[in-house]
Image (cartoon, rainbow, N blue to C red):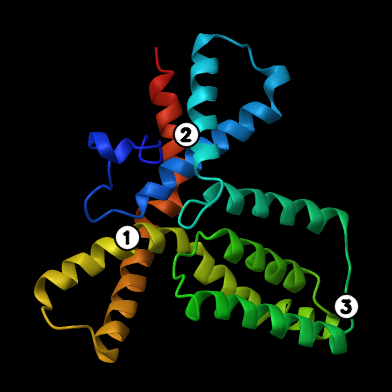
Amino acid sequence: MLQGFPYSYNIGIGSLGSARPLWTVSIEWWIYILFGILLFFRKIKINPLIIFIFVISFIISFYNIGGRGSSLTIYWIIGVLLAILYNLTEVRLKISVFIPIFLFIISAFLYRIYVFQQYEMYDVGLAFLLFVILYLLINSPKEISNLFSSKLFSSVSKFLASFSYSLYLVHYSIIVIIRVYYKEDFDYYAILFIFIICNISAYIFYLFFEKNHYKFKYWFKSFIHAD
């Protein structure tokens, strides 16, 4: 849980082997804790433990607020702002205005990635451009939003979203395993094979674990509260 703490790597707190993507999970957990305390501080009984947890969560959240590869807090805040704006505003541009603006922002996003070779997706500039892209899509003209509201698009989106987090958790470990046995450089066929295997594995993982996390939560609560 201290993988995102400043200089923690210097004392041996690093990535969890092939489960390296979990480094973001620990940081995001502390971000939730920080903003949870800030939001509910009037209802929280302040004690030394709460103060200690707040200090740790503040340091980790602030340390990851900006910089290339260290902007997870910015991304979290962007998600919150999008949710607020979605519920408070509805500014729909005409499609003749929307298309050139949207294409320009997409081009700027790709330009920042490829021209400057900033493949790190936690960059502040990319975070801002992603915010604009998502906001435009949320408030897209009816001609475009109607496509998003179709039953087919909705069904496919829900299916892909259902195991997307599981895919994030397991994909890197699967790639590492394949890499052990596949010594050559990955070609297009190998990448396609990895893509298929990762998604199938993630969906199976989702069926066994993520889909049933509520059951585990209720079981765990009954276990820790058992007499």
Residue lying at the far front of the rendered structure: 116
Tag on residue 170? 1
**Which quadrant holds residue 2?**
top left
Where residue 41 appears, as percent x and y from the top left, is 68, 21
5 to the left or right of 103: left
Q: Do we see residue 13 in this rendering?
A: no
Q: Is residue 8 above or below residue 177?
A: above
Query: Residue 93 got which mark?
Result: 3
Classify residue 14 by image quadrant: top left
Q: Position of residue 227 (x, y in %)?
A: 39, 12
Q: Residue shown at 40%/17% (left/top)?
A: 226
User: In front of the other: label 2 or label 1?
Assistant: 1
* Image position of 106 with respect to 76: above or below: below
Kind of residue indicated by mark 3: Leu
* Residues at discs 3 and 1 in contact (Cβ within 8 Å): no
Mark nearer the viewer, 3 or 2: 3
In this view, 206 is above or below 191: above
Disc 3 packing (10 Å; few <14; some 14–19; many ≥20): some
Q: Which residue is mark 2?
A: 218
Please indicate whether residue 41 sits to the left or right of residue 139 in the image.
left
> Between marks 3 and 1, how big is the CA–CA gap?
39 Å
SS for dot 1 = helix
